[in-house]
Amino acid sequence: MKKIIPLLIVGILILTGLGAAAIPFSKNAEIQTKQNRINTGSRGDELDQSMTSYDGVLPLGRTNIFGYYANLSIAQSFKPQKEIQTRAQFLMARNATTLYPCYLAVRDTLTGEDLTIIAVEPDEFPLVSGTPTEEQLAWVEFNFKDIKITPEQTYYIVVYTANITENYYWISGNGTNIYPDGGVFLSIDDGNTWSEFTDADGCFKTYGRNNEAPETPSIDGPAKGKVGKPITYTFVTDDPDGDEVYYCINWSDGTPEVIIGPFTSGEKATANHTWSEKGTYIIKAKAKNVWDKESDWATLSVTMPCSYNIPFQPFWERLFERFPNAFPILRHLLRY
């Protein structure tokens, strides 16, 4: 990459001209900062894609390149294998005059909307004076909000900073040991146009995890009830990745299925239901995590033996409550 840096920069200047916008080109109005990031799951991620062979650096941001000021942005395409993408790292450093954050976004097209984005402040990067050596660089983590993607599909990691004079970082790459499932793209007009260079890649790592289904939930509650009286049931499951879950409940009496949540993995959820007719009903419930992976159905059989239409019902209820083990034949006849 040391040999191709001048050619890359000259090519970019010729192809796209010099941009001068003064703001970051985020496609997402709500930028996630390192201080307020939210990750779901247990963080049990693994290295997914990477290119770690160092060969040189490029300035990232607005800096003087051969007598011209250009705001250079970098995009690295890659093909993830893990369904949930959790974070990325780049081998980078910052200049002493750098004051604005470095942004990283993941997109499914170069100029499309951000699937996720994070801003990392300059003090998270090693400070260098002049062009850094490999030893002066560090793997800087961009711990963005987890996203669900389609494995084997091409995505783009876009890295940039504010278009402010002398506000720039150093980002490393390689022009000899090429990443096989992607390439690097450069822009100097705040991401409006990009030029691809097939003989270079950035030094990067991406991390992810598989999307495991929640366990089949348990259903806890009375196996018998009274027609017209609400009954409370408890539902609980564990998600292997620690993701939040929803519960889909079917009361099997013709009423619409209900969805409740989200709930923390292992947290008990409750729902009430009232049956309007006598009979035996099969409560069905399944869990779905926030990434749409579903469990198997759980079931519980419930019988509605008693109706409020029984003559003198309040009397019988009070009697059976007072003597819970008495009058078994009468209980059977009245279906208590």
Image (cartoon, helix red, strand yellow):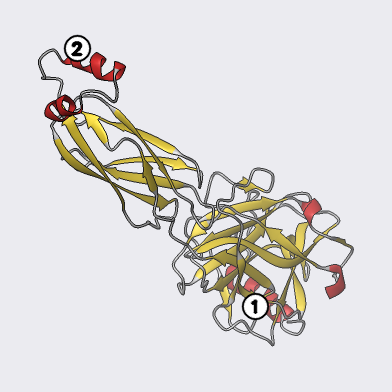
Please state which of residues 58 and 33 is positioned toward the viewer in this rendering. Answer: 33
The residue under label 2 is which amino acid type? Phe
Identify the residue under disc 1: 201
Q: Quadrant of the C terminus?
A: top left
- Horizontal side, residue 240 vs residue 321: left or right: right
Q: Judge whether residue 19 can be spotted in this image.
A: yes
Could you say which quadrant of the image residue 96 lies in? bottom right
> Could you tell me how far apart the alpha carbons at marks 1 and 2 are, in whole angstroms?
82 Å
The residue lying at 66 percent from left, 51 percent from top is 119
User: Which of pointers 1 and 2 lies earlier in the amino acid sequence?
Assistant: 1
Q: Position of residue 38 (x, y in %)?
A: 59, 47
Please state which of residues 40 and 264 is positioned toward the viewer in this rendering. Answer: 264
Q: Quadrant of the N terminus?
A: bottom right
Asked if residue 21 is positioned above or below residue 273 in the image, the reply reads below
- Horizontal side, residue 53 vs residue 219: left or right: right
Q: Position of residue 213 (x, y in %)?
A: 43, 59
